[in-house]
Structure formats: structure tokens, C-alpha cells
Amino acid sequence: MRRTDALIAVAVALMEEPMGKHWGYQLSKQSHIRSGVLYPILTRLLDAGWLTDGWEDPSTIEGRPPRRYYELTDRGRVELGTLAQEAPIRNLGLRLGGALG
Amino acid sequence: MTELLADPRTVLVVALTFGFAPRVILHLAVRLYPQGHDRRAELIAEAEIVPFHKRPVWVADVLAVCIFEGLSERARYRRLHGNTAGMVRVLTLIQIGLPLSVIGMWVVNLADDQHPSSWLELCGLTFLSAALLLLTRSSIREARNLERRRRALAEDSHYDSGPD
């Protein structure tokens, strides 16, 4: 999978709670990635088998439709964990690159 | 400021910009995804969570996703679930009808003892028909292969697993 800055930001957001449920809009806020970029990334992660998805139980909510959630798979935790660890190094590299012109 | 808030036109514009319009646009945009696609229900449900004042921008963003992802998903869906049986039927009819028509023309020409130029035209037509027959034959084979692949891909995770 192509390692873009957006993918790394999503990986960092997902790895903040590796065993939890994640929601599209919440991930967008956490990673500061626009919805237009986030949803195609989520599709790619689902296709790669790094994420699984599910739906809220309609009996537990009221006044709104059930939302779709995403959970990391074991493989996803490994792969995205590695990617999230690279994030500070990559950011440092980008900053150094910018500073050096 | 209070005068502005009291103006019914301002209230109407605000309601349209932040309430009605984003909702309508979103409901239309998600229709770009094929029927039963999870993203349709997901985006409509997510819109409920987005704060009122952020909805126009969020919907504009999502609109781009719907156009690019939705249309490609629709094309993918057509490849997976389109009607090949109908196409095979039409192609089979061409395969039967075309040789029969060409044979018929040859019989009529032989019976009427036509001008040589007419024989030349008939030869050209026969040649074209043969080429077309080869093409339809390969198309039928391709359609049957597609149908086999479709059956293998029938368990597609992106479809019909949405909320009950």
C-alpha cells in the first residue's frame, strides 16, 4: 500500500485506540484528514484486510440511523502500528527537508 | 445583529444553507453508489453527527468522494452483477441469423442469375459476415468467462451488509 502522509495520519489515529471501534467523522477529526481523503483510505484498508467494519445495534440508539464503525484486525494492528511508529521520523524528515530547502 | 436574526429571510437562508441543502445534496450524492453499497447508509448516518455549522463543507467534501468512488464502485458493480445472459442471447441470435441471411442471399442470387458486380458485393458481404461471426463467437466466450468470474466473486464484502 502506498504510504502517504494521509495514510500515516489515519494510522496514528487508529493506533491511539488499537482495540476500539472507530467512526468515520471521529477519525477525520483525530487525524485532521478531510472526509474526501479519509473514506477512500478506509476502503483501501478494508480491501487490504487491515480493518473490519460493522454497524451499530439499532436498538441501542435513538433518533438517528445506525453508524458504521471500523475495527483494526490483528494484521492491521501490526501493519498500521509499524506505519504509526514511522510517523515521527517521517515528519522530522519532512521538517528537515523543508528547513534545508 | 438582532435585526438580522429577526429577519425571516436570513433565517430561511441559514436553514437552507446549513440544514436543508446539505441534506438534499448528500441524499442525491450517495445515489452515485450502487444500490445496497455500505457507503450510502454510512454517509447519511455520519451526517447526523457532523455539527450543524460544519455540514455544508463536510457535504461538499463528501460529494467529491461520491463522484469519484461512487462512480467507480458503480462500474465495478456492473462488471460483477450486470446482465450477461441477455448479451449472450443476442449474440447467439446473430450467430444463427447472420449465416442464414447470407445463405439466403446466395440462393436468391443463384436463382436470379445476377450481374457479376452483384456477386462481388455478395462475396464482400460474406467475408464481412464471417468476420462478424468470429467476433460474436469470441464475445460469447468472453461473456461466459465473465459470468464464471462473477460467480466466484459473488461473496463481495462491500455490498448488502448494511444495517438492518
Image: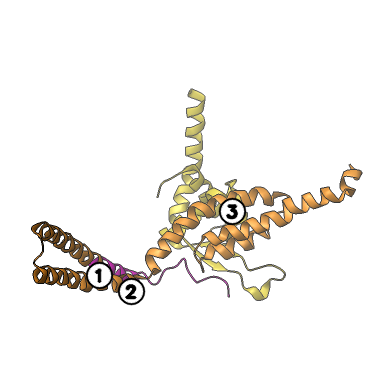
Chain colours: A yellow, B orange
Q: Are marks 1 and 3 on the same chain?
A: no
Q: Which residues are magenta?
A: B141-164
Dot 2: what SS?
helix
Q: Can you tell which quarter of the image residue B25 is in?
A: bottom right
Q: Are marks 2 and 3 on the same chain?
A: no
Give me the C-alpha separation between circle 2 and circle 1: 14 Å
Which residue is under mark 3? Answer: A27
Which residue is under mark 1? Answer: B94
Which residue sits at x=88%, y=48%?
B7
Q: Eyeballing the image, is B6 above or below B113?
A: above
- Chain letter for the residue marked with disc 2 in the picture: B
Q: Eyeballing the image, is B51 above or below B41?
A: above
Indicate the amino acid at tag 2.
Answer: Ala
Q: Is residue A19 left or right of residue B98?
A: right
**Among numbered discs 2 and 1, the one appearing first in the sequence:** 2
Which residue is under mark 2? Answer: B85
In this rendered view, identify the residue nearer to me: B9 or A96: B9
Indicate the amino acid at tag 1.
Answer: Ile
In this rendered view, identify the residue nearer to me: B22 or A72: B22
Dot 1: what SS?
helix
Q: Is residue A100 left or right of residue B4?
A: left
Q: Can you tell which quarter of the image residue B101 is in?
A: bottom left
Which residue sits at x=51%, y=51%?
A11
